[in-house]
Amino acid sequence: MDRITDPIVTSGGMSMPKLGLGTWRMKGAECTEAVQRALGLGYRHIDTAEMYGNEEAVGEALVNGGVPRDQVHVTSKVWHENLSADAMQRSIDASLAKLRTDYVDLYLIHWPSVDMDLPDAVHNLMRVKEQGKARAIGVSNFPVALLRRAVEEVQAPIACNQFEYHVLLGQSSLVGYCQSHGVAASAYAPLAQGRLAEHEELQAIARKHGATPAQVALKWLLDQPGVAAIPKAMRAESQQANLDALRIELDDTDRAAISMLPKTQRFVNPGWAPVWDLAA
Ligand SMILES: NC(=O)c1ccc[n+]([C@@H]2O[C@H](COP(=O)([O-])OP(=O)(O)OC[C@H]3O[C@@H](n4cnc5c(N)ncnc54)[C@H](OP(=O)(O)O)[C@@H]3O)[C@@H](O)[C@H]2O)c1
């Protein structure tokens, strides 16, 4: 895999570039500028959410970024308090208006909620797809037990589960479930929120490849079948460095060293998070 537009194709036919641009915590003109710059560099996958408060800024970049809308994969997400039929309709309509588009490529339930009616929430998501407002639908932060219910019990066309995944957090059961069910696994916080930029063990591997620890961490994810990664990068040099990560060729020795790193460090764990899989 060496081209940034190389996609993951899911069992339902969704095609999503493996490397995307995360936008959490980017706001306003700074966000518009960063997304436009990324589009100029060749990014074709942008991740946003109604909760990020930046869909207008992303929409501005989509309209003025010089790339036809149908060549950019746009993911947005509905907040967990808006999973009822009416609320979800209001959410998707507001997201589309802010993003200045008729559809998103992927619409995700951002977090499961403890008191949600899962089949009902997933049916509401399916309605958004039927209406053509989302080309594909999926979930985020769903552990295997919840993902299995959406896929096998509700039989929803879940194209993606987006969850925290990086060299310091093992997710083998979730990734395995996604791979065996044609669901794209989208790794968020793939750089452990910037912490991996200075990581000592990764530095040793990086030196060997004339690369940086962040690039090694990213390539380790992107080498895995069915796994996408959406690093947030505001700075031009980070955006370019993450594209250049695709050129690194990790070997078995590198992968063995990475597999020895502790795999229990979760950095995104808000009060409303579900019970995570123990056998991750
Ligand atoms: N579904 C969910 O619940 C959920 C939760 C968290 C995140 N997400 C999504 O995932 C995206 C990524 O996660 P994240 O933003 O939490 O963390 P992240 O992507 O792991 O880390 C972002 C940090 O790493 C820095 N960085 C990026 N590329 C770098 C490079 N090549 N070298 C050195 N530093 C680099 C960035 O700096 P600069 O920006 O200064 O360049 C930023 O400070 C989010 O933006 C969001 O779209 C989703």
Image (tube, rainbow, N blue to C red):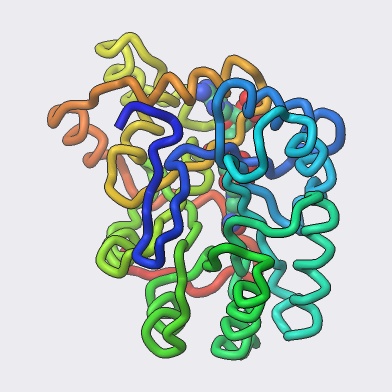
Image vertical order of residue 272 relative to residue 77, above or below: below
Residue 111's quadrant in the figure?
bottom right
Image vertical order of residue 238 relative to residue 80, above or below: above
In front here: 62 or 117?
62
Residue 1 horizontal side relative to residue 269, left or right: left
Is the N terminus in the top left, top right, bottom left or bottom right quadrant? top left
- Picture coordinates of residue 170 (x, y %)? 33, 53
- Picture coordinates of residue 254 (x, y %)? 20, 28
Q: Residue at x 45, y 75 (%)?
A: 157
Q: Residue at x 43, y 19 (%)?
A: 244
Residue 276 horizontal side relative to residue 27, left or right: left
Residue 259's quadrant in the figure?
top left
Ligand 1 image-quadrant field: top right
Q: Residue at x 54, y 49 (%)?
A: 267
Is the C terminus in the top left, top right, bottom left or bottom right quadrant? bottom left
Residue 215 horizontal side relative to residue 35, left or right: left
Tell me, yes or no, if residue 193 can be seen here. Answer: no
Q: Residue at x 71, y 67 (%)?
A: 79
Residue 214's quadrant in the figure?
top left
Residue 258 horizontal side relative to residue 29, left or right: left
Image vertical order of residue 28 relative to residue 225, above or below: above
Q: How many marks?
A: 0
- Picture coordinates of residue 165 (x, y %)? 43, 49
